[in-house]
Image (tube, coloured by chain):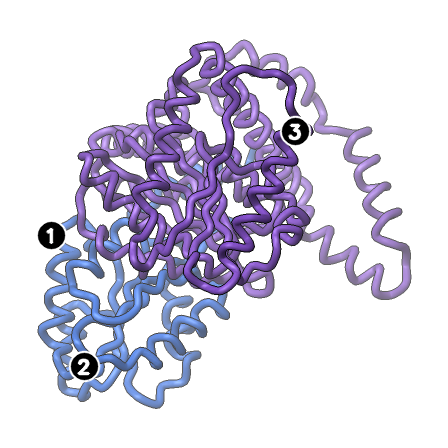
Chain colours: A purple, B blue
Amino acid sequence: MTPSALEAVEEIASRVRNRDRRGLARGLSWIEDRTPAGRALLDRLYRADHPAHRVGITGPPGSGKSTIVNELTRRLRARGAAVGILAVDPSSPFTGGAILGDRIRMQDHSSDPDVFIRSMASRGSLGGLAAASIEASELLEAAGFDWILLETVGVGQSEMEVVEAADTTVLVLVPESGDAVQVMKAGVMEGGDVFVINKYDREGGDRLEKEVSLMLELSRELNATGVADRWEPPICRTVALRADGIDALLEAIDRHRAHLERDPERRREVRSRKIARRLRTQLRDRLVGGLVRRWDLEGWVAETTARIQEGKGSPYALVDSLVARLLEEGVPGARDDARRSEGRGAEERP
Amino acid sequence: MTQDEKIRILVAKPGLDGHDRGAKVIATAFRDAGFEVIYTGLHQTPEMIVDAAIQEDVDVVSLSILSGAHMTLFQRVLDLLRERGGEEIHVIGGGIIPEEDAAKLREMGVGEIFGPGTPTGAPIEYIRRRFETGRGQSQQGTEEAAKEGDAT
């Protein structure tokens, strides 16, 4: 990195530490744009002790996640906590554009200096969403926010990764989202630490609650390994628009946090799991991103698409042979490079 | 601009008029053009708009005003952006704004005003032309760094 680029990184790092909004916003853009400056910034600001409590909130579109975030924020602010919010919405797979509208429901806090709201689009399809939003939450952590609320539409694998990286994962369901079997099919049940049935006053609310509670009981019996002090995911009924049930929800989140922190052994385990996961997403993101750029794989996709359309081969064989070639040839001298860079300080460019 | 970079635009409706059809049309057109649109909806104060623009680190603020209060609202947004370190954020607008007012607004620092009947392609072209070479001067350091990263 050039001296002027490094200087820019140092400047933004100190502005983030001082919670300067403009500097923090710029740093978040570096991270979203997957720039080396963004990584250098994270390297300087990384905190292995993870002082903030991260709450991932996921659920189907329209289930009231933003409204819940808004109400949770109000209560956290009343306690004097500073709150950073990341609202992730999908990018259009066709144009790459996105409409990010979660702020509409969070406007009560838009001018509060101790609340920072950032909308993020999921962007490219080749990984990156989980990495970018986790990195963004690390930047908010470095800026001294006590709580970080991460909101995503929980429909895909990468969205689940986002919320799983949180300390407490809240799953929001609504009577309209179908019966609990649908929820089970979506494979999101296992990830939840706290379940919310929002719009509980609508028809089917009590039935959904019964089904969810049955499923939780079932999974409890199946996984009864005799662990003492196991976390039992509670079910919270809310009508977020009227702020009904939000106090109880925050209390449930508090209890989960206390549960995590009560046992130092468990706390260590949770932290190390988080660091390992962090390494994995970072590795995948950097590897895939690096390979895509280095070999112009997007160009390869375009060319190969045309070939397949002309009837010259199938995706399976063509990807197979490309991957085989990449693995065989590798980057000339890459192995030596990797070994050498291990010995170098983190200051060096990877 | 690398493939990871996106033009980010805040589409907002300041003031009291309740007609957000135009804002929604332009937000959708911007998304279809590949931009990331932060949409904050109706009844925004200039303070709320500027707070959102700063936190979201947008390149452009696009205001839709049909109430007739455009002179004061644009002025306030420009002033607040300057006050809060967002002076390089580009401001454009649309709505019912007479040409002589539009000329004054341009003098004040508004990039362009798109009146009724403007095809949605016009603001998109305008923004692309302005930003396709990068996100403005202030990010030169990043771009330099990004280029260097590509060379690894």
Chain of the residue that carries numbered disc 3 in the rendered image: A
Q: Secondary structure at mark 3?
A: helix
A315 sits to left or right of A258? right
Q: Quadrant of residue A334?
A: top right
**Vertically, is A268 above or below B115?**
above
Q: Looking at the rendered structure, which numbered label has been put on residue A183?
A: none
Chain of the residue that carries numbered disc 1 in the rendered image: B
Mark 3 packing: few (<14 Cα in 10 Å), some, or many (20+)? Answer: few
Residue bearing mark 2: B102
Marks 2, 1 in one chain:
yes
The quarter of the rendered structure image containing the N terminus of chain A is: top left
> Of circles 2 and 3, which is in front?
3
**Can you give x and y, in whole percent of width and height, for residue A188 in the image?**
60, 43
Q: Nearer the viewer, residue A170 or A135?
A: A170
> Of circles 3 and 1, which is in front?
3
**Vertically, is B117 above or below A75?**
below
Q: What is the CA distance from the residue labelled 3 to the residue labelled 1?
A: 60 Å
Q: What's under tag 1, amino acid-wise?
A: Glu
Q: What's under tag 3, amino acid-wise?
A: Glu
Pointer 2 and pointer 1: residues touching (CB < 8 Å)? no
In percent of the image, x 56 and y 26: which residue is there? A277
Q: Nearer the viewer, residue A172 or B12?
A: A172
Residue bearing mark 1: B83
**Can you give x and y, in whole percent of width and height, for residue A348 in the image?**
46, 20
Q: Nearer the viewer, residue A107 or A177?
A: A177
Q: Looking at the rendered structure, which numbered label has been put on residue A221?
A: 3
In percent of the image, x 56 and y 22: which residue is there? A276
Chain of the residue that carries numbered disc 2 in the rendered image: B
Q: Nearer the viewer, residue A257 or B26?
A: A257
In percent of the image, x 40 and y 54: which residue is there? B134
Q: Secondary structure at mark 1?
A: helix
Q: Is residue A44 visible?
A: no
